[in-house]
């Protein structure tokens, strides 16, 4: 039998192969199956594995250059982002235990995350975000979550109205903050990202953690 019979007399050829009456298609023919197994089981050419390993490593390095990883979430009608190195965990909402004599609406109380007690804040109140008549959502099913963030040993927990997850972007996608951004949000926004036809405020984590520590601790 011609080793390339499926391209000569099979379904990709002139269809004169007598075995087509029995198998209806070359995919069902033992000759085709044997040829496929032989192709997969053959030894790799000399240097193939080294070349493939080098190629994959180089591709990964090229993708990582000039890109950043961000976590994207929604508060009220605003889509915001923080660098993923500050996000340690995303959990389902947990009961918030209020603290007596709290002096502002930013400090919600404390929550237990995996048996550890953490300070829970309202990032919505901290940024001065207001509810809008309609919030732009990404998914028809909205899951509220709690986000645990940490930087240099300082850890905070805050609820979000919607969590998209992790997204990698190129530095060229970071745009200057326009003057139309609200004063409070703009203070903590270091760049704007156009993502899925939505403007995302990329928050300045350095300033955010510094201000939280100064005002609440």
Image: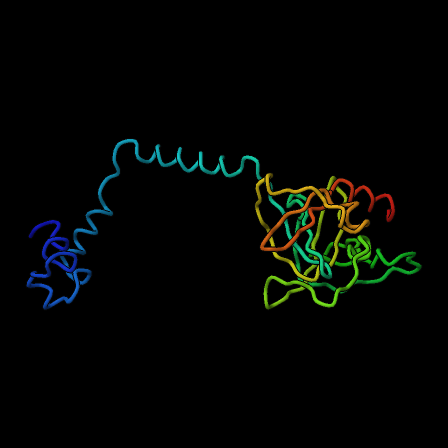
Closer to the camera in the image, 111 or 168: 168
**Residue, x 60% and y 61% (percent of image)?**
138
**Residue beneath the point at 91% across and 60% down:** 100
- Residue 92 is situated, as x and y percent measured from the top left of the image, at 67, 62
- The residue shown at (60%, 43%) is 173
Q: Is residue 51 left or right of residue 61?
A: left
Give the x, y percent position of residue 204. 73, 43
Residue 188, quarter of the rendered image: top right
The image shows residue 180 at horizontal and vertical percentages of 76, 50
Q: Nearer the viewer, residue 199 or 210?
A: 199
Taking 66 as reference, is 18 left or right? Answer: left
Residue 42: image location, x then y, percent? 22, 43
Tell whether 13 sits left or right of 65: left
Out of 30 and 130, give the one closest to the viewer: 130
Task: Please say if 146 is above or below 3.
Answer: below
Residue at the front extreme?
Answer: 179
Q: Picture quarter containing residue 169?
A: top right
Q: How is the image coloured?
A: rainbow
Give the mark count.
0
Instruction: Please report the residue visible at 8 percent of the width from the left and 50 percent of the height from the top.
Output: 2
Tell which of 91 and 14 is nearer to you.
14
3 left or right of 189 in image: left
């Amino acid at each position: 039998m011609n080793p390339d019979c499926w391209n000569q007399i099979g379904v990709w050829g002139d269809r004169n192969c007598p075995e087509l009456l029995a198998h209806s298609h070359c995919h069902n023919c033992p000759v085709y199956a044997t040829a496929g197994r032989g192709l997969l089981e053959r030894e790799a050419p000399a240097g193939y594995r080294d070349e493939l390993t080098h190629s994959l490593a180089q591709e990964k390095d090229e993708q990582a250059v000039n890109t950043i990883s961000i976590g994207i979430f929604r508060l009220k009608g605003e889509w915001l982002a923080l660098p993923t190195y500050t996000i340690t965990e995303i959990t389902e909402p947990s009961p918030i235990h209020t603290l007596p004599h709290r002096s502002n609406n930013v400090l919600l109380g404390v929550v237990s995350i995996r048996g550890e007690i953490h300070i829970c804040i309202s990032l919505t109140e901290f940024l001065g975000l207001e509810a809008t008549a309609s919030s732009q959502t990404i998914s028809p099913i909205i899951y509220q979550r709690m986000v645990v963030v940490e930087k240099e040993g300082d850890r905070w927990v805050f609820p979000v109205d919607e969590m998209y997850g992790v997204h990698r972007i190129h530095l060229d996608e970071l745009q200057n903050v326009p003057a139309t951004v609200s004063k409070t949000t703009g203070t903590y926004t270091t760049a704007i990202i156009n993502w899925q036809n939505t403007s995302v405020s990329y928050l300045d984590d350095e300033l955010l953690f510094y201000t939280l520590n100064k005002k609440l601790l």
